[in-house]
């Protein structure tokens, strides 16, 4: 049990007696105008098929305030009705937008009947690591029937992001939506007239918690669950003739339709929000001009087809310069990346890997397109060639990293249960005692005190840089996502040993999610400039639940002096031993503690017999702990 002194409590209360959800003191943001975005507000785009223009420019940054009400709602994204985990009654969730530098305040009203957290995918959370939304790493759980407020700024960030639950596998059931930060000085602002957001995702009819239990059942010998359908912006089409008896399924479900005006130019912000599926994306007869990759402007490059892995985002400009007609939007699930055995969950799925939507010119008949797919082959299970993605403006990577880590990615059956391992250890989230609480001001631990199953990688070099070598020792492809940073992709290649002779030390691609092919390696670098607790994990959600997660402890010497707002700490229950008389005086806390205990088995990874397999990689050069 951790003990926090009364002195720390008094100091914290005095520091925050007049502050709720304070922004970091170092942000130096001018006095902000406050603005509440409602569903009636034209800037609060709840219709993903409606085009929009950049937000009006303000004289100085303002506060944009949103409310997301989470609840389970019966919907049929692909025609098959099921309980969907929605935000404001819809799936995908509402689009959140802001301008560069704005303060973003988001009230989460949790009516799910379950705990939750929300992560802001791609946002660096400078000075606000406690709002990163990762259960067990940066915060405790938001209880059902309560409201929790996230309050952060993107700072200098701009571009295409998304938000999703980061507790269990909830986002697979629908808790996800787009987050857009406009740059009033966007160098490509004059290259497009309007914008759209488009999400790509796989979809399951069975709730994800049930699928995870099957995936981690003792003796299970299959791969990840096979989806039932694929969706473009929340719409797809399931073959209802294959629906189980007694289920509700409406055939010929409407497809995603984007209506455009001939002669205009459109910026499509395309986001892969899947549980696992990578997509190959294209629009018949319309080349895609890439201008942004995961919050980084790039020198424009035109392609006909783009591979998009889970968590990745691209902004592409599409010219409406063809005849008034209908054209297929194609988001093909890359079948070669989805592994299957006869034992695999939902192996008899009627999944149509060729997911489609319609690009419809205004005035065209409401009929299906007859257009043909681009006659072009691209490599499966790979990212867009990183050598083609050049930053605009360019910047160089760190030349000599001060802190080096190797993460070996493997699978293993431990006590008959399949686990996904980082350096021999599956991550075990401590959902009621997150890492940030332990290490930041008011906590009483140091990184060396974290258990080996916390998969902590620690670095504390001022003005230094990190190099991570990812070694994928299995045949599966893994899209690895880093919180708190974008990274430079130095190189990647086959085998288990990185080759420094092919590192790009001049102008490497920069992004926050990289696909690591089977039996291969990838090396990334980034600067040490954001103290915090940052998750680094495969974004295949089934692998996350199996333990393929690390956490990077950055600049503990600074982090330990940073306080956590009281409202963030307040959602953590007391020590969850058996209820005693004192606990019973607080019925709400007692009920929450009892609910939390239900998750102990869910997160009970099997103990690894020899943790030294992990420890030898855990604290490497540059770490003093």
Image (tube, rainbow, N blue to C red):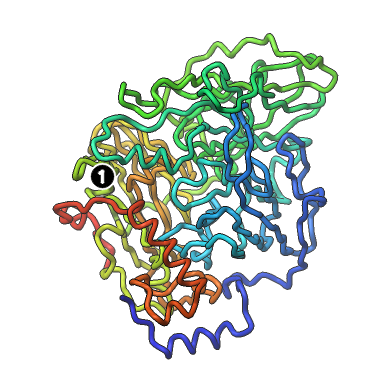
Picture residue at 20% right of the left edge, 58% below the top: 615
* Residue 431 lies in quadrant: bottom left
Q: Residues within 10 Å of mark 1 (few under 14, many from 20)?
A: many
Closer to the camera, 465 or 238? 238
Picture residue at 15% right of the left edge, 52% below the top: 609
* Residue 474 lies in quadrant: top left
Q: Give the image location of residue 601, x and y in percent.
A: 33, 53
Image quadrant holding the C terminus, namely bottom left
Instruction: Answer whether residue 494 is visible to the viewer in this image.
Output: no
Closer to the camera, 443 or 469? 443
125 on left or right of 452: right
Picture residue at 27% right of the left edge, 46% below the top: 421
Disc 1 element: strand
Q: In this view, does 444 lie above or below 386?
A: below
205 on left or right of 286: left
- The residue furthest front is 246
Q: Mark 1 points at which residue?
A: 408
Q: Is residue 569 above or below residue 399?
A: below
Closer to the camera, 503 or 227? 227
Q: Give the image location of residue 346, x and y in percent.
A: 41, 26
Q: Give the image location of residue 405, x and y in percent.
A: 28, 53
Closer to the camera, 287 or 86? 86
- The residue furthest right is 363
Instruction: Answer whether residue 424 is visible to the viewer in this image.
Output: yes
Picture residue at 26% right of the left edge, 31% below the top: 221
* Residue 75 lies in quadrant: top right
Image quadrant holding the N terminus, namely bottom left
432 on left or right of 282: left
Q: Give the image location of residue 38, x and y in percent.
A: 77, 55
Q: In this view, does 89 lie above or below 29?
A: above
């Amino acid at each position: 049990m951790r003990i926090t002194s009364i002195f720390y409590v008094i100091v914290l209360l005095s520091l925050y007696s007049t502050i709720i959800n304070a922004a970091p003191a170092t942000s130096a943001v001018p006095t902000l105008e406050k603005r509440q975005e409602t569903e009636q507000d034209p800037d609060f785009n709840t219709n993903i098929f409606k085009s929009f223009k950049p937000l009006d420019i303000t004289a100085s940054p303002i506060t944009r305030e949103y409310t997301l009400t989470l609840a389970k709602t019966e919907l049929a994204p692909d025609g098959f009705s099921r309980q969907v985990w929605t935000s404001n009654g819809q799936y995908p969730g509402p689009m959140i937008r802001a301008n560069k530098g704005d303060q973003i305040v988001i009230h989460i009203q949790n009516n799910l009947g379950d705990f939750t957290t929300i992560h802001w995918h791609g946002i660096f959370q400078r000075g606000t690591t406690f709002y990163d939304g990762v259960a067990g790493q940066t915060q405790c759980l938001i209880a059902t029937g309560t409201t929790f407020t996230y309050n952060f700024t993107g700072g200098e960030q701009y571009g295409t992001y998304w938000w999703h639950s980061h507790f269990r596998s909830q986002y697979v059931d629908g808790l996800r939506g787009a987050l857009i930060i406009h740059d009033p000085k966007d160098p490509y602002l004059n290259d497009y007239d309007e914008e759209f957001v488009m999400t790509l995702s796989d979809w399951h009819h069975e709730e994800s918690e049930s699928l995870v239990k099957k995936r981690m059942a003792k003796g299970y010998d299959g791969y990840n669950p096979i989806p039932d359908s694929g969706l473009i912006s929340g719409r797809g089409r399931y073959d209802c003739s294959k629906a189980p008896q007694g289920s509700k399924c409406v055939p010929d479900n409407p497809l995603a339709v984007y209506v455009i005006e001939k002669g205009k130019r459109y910026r499509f912000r395309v986001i892969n929000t899947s549980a696992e599926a990578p997509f190959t994306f294209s629009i018949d007869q319309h080349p895609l001009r890439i201008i942004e990759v995961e919050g980084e402007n790039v020198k424009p490059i035109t392609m006909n087809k783009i591979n998009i892995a889970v968590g990745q985002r691209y902004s592409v400009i599409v010219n409406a310069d063809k005849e008034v007609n209908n054209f297929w939007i194609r988001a093909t699930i890359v079948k070669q990346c989805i592994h299957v055995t006869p034992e695999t969950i939902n192996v008899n799925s009627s999944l149509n890997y060729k997911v489609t939507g319609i690009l419809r010119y205004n005035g065209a008949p409401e009929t299906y397109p007859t257009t043909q797919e681009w006659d072009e082959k691209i490599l499966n299970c790979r990212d867009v060639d990183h050598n083609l993605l050049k930053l605009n403006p360019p910047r160089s990577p760190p030349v000599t990293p001060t802190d080096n880590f190797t993460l070996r990615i493997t699978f293993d059956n431990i006590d008959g249960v399949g686990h996904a391992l980082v350096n021999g250890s599956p991550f075990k989230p401590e959902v009621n005692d997150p890492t940030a609480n332990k290490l930041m001001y008011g906590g009483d631990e140091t990184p060396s005190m974290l258990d080996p199953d916390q998969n902590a990688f620690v670095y504390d070099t001022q003005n230094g840089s990190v190099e991570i070598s990812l070694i994928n020792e299995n045949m599966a492809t893994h899209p690895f996502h880093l919180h708190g940073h974008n990274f430079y992709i130095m190189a990647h290649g086959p085998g288990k040993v990185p080759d420094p002779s092919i590192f790009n030390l001049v102008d490497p691609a920069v992004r926050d999610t990289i696909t690591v092919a089977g039996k291969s390696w990838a090396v990334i670098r980034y600067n040490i400039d954001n103290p915090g607790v940052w998750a680094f994990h495969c974004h295949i959600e089934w692998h996350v639940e199996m333990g393929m997660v690390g956490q990077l402890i950055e600049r503990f010497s600074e982090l330990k002096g940073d306080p956590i707002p009281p409202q963030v700490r307040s959602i953590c229950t007391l020590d969850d031993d058996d209820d005693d008389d004192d606990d019973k005086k607080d019925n709400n806390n007692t009920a929450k503690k009892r609910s939390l205990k239900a998750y102990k088995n869910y997160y009970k990874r099997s103990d690894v017999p020899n943790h030294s397999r992990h420890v030898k990689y855990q604290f490497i050069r540059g770490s003093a702990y």
